[in-house]
Amino acid sequence: MAAPLFDQLKADNADAWQAYTHHDFVVGMQSGELPKTAFQHYLKQDYLFLIQFARAYALAIYKADNLTEMRSALAGVKAILEMEMDLHVGYCADWGIEAAELETLEEAPENIAYTRFVLERGMAGDLLDLMVALAPCAIGYGEIGARLSKSRETKIEGNPYLTWIEMYAGEEYQALVADMTAEIDTLAVKRFTKARFPDLSKTFGVATRLEADFWQMGLSAG
C-alpha cells in the first residue's frame, strides 16, 4: 500500500522539512531561551498570516468540485475568522500586544512571499495544489508541537512558550492535522497522477522553505 501523499512529499523534501521543523526558532521555544522580542514579532506577523490563510480557504471553496469539498473549505474559513483570529488576538494580548497595534501592522516581506505563493498556487492549479501548499504550515505545526511536548529536552517549568507547544500538541489541533492529511489523500484519489508528483513536490518544498524563512524572520527581529 502506497504511503499517504503527504508522507511522500515530506520524504521527497526531507532536508527542507528538517530545516523547518528543527529551526533555531523552534529550538529556542523548546529551551525557553527564544528572545521575547522574536516571539512577539512572529505573533504580530502570524496575525496577518491568518488573514491570508482565510483567503486561501475561501479560494478553496471556489476550486472545489462538489459540496463536500466546499463545506470542508468553508469550515476552514469559519474556523479562522470566527475562532482562531479571536484566540490569536487574546494570545497576543498575553504577550503585551494590543489589538489596536495588530490593525496597523505592515506585512513583512517573508510573510508576503509565503502567503502570496500559497494563493498563487491555488489560483494557477487545482484544489490539490492549494492544499499541498497549505500543508507545511497546518500539518508542520502539529508535528512540531507533538515532538516538543514529548521530548525530554523541552523545558517545562518557567518556559514562556509552553502554551504554544501545548496548543499545537493538543487533541483538538492534532485532530485537525489528521483531517488535513486525510483530505489530501481524498483529493489525490481523483486528482493525483504520478506525472503530477514532481510539480506537487516542488510546491511543497517551496512552501516548506518559506515556512523556515518565517521562523527566521522572527528570530532576526529578536
Image: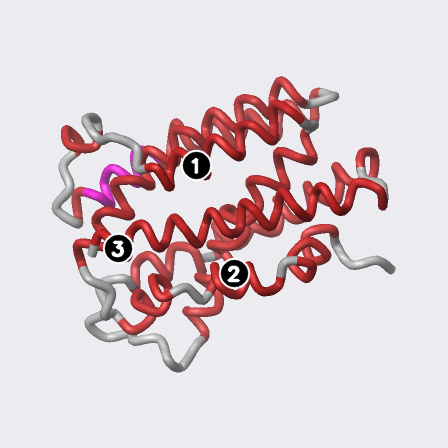
> Is residue 192 left or right of 200 when viewed as pictured?
right
Q: Give the image location of residue 191, x and y in percent.
A: 80, 34
Residues at marks 1 and 2 touching, judged by CB atoms closer than 8 Å: no
Q: Is residue 179 magenta?
A: no
Residues rendered magenta in the picture? 85-92
Q: Amino acid at mark 2?
A: Glu
Q: Is residue 90 magenta?
A: yes
Question: Can you identify the residue that label 2 sits on?
Answer: 143
Vertical side of 92 occupied by 115: above or below: above
- Most common SS among magenta residues: helix
Of the 4 image quadrants, the one containing the C terminus is: bottom left
Question: Can you identify the residue that label 1 sits on?
Answer: 113
Q: CA distance from mark 1 to mark 3?
A: 17 Å
Q: Give the image location of residue 49, x and y in percent.
A: 38, 36
Q: Amino acid at mark 3?
A: Ser
Question: Can you identify the residue that label 3 sits on?
Answer: 220
Query: Which SS class for mark 3?
Result: helix
Query: Which SS class for mark 1?
Result: helix
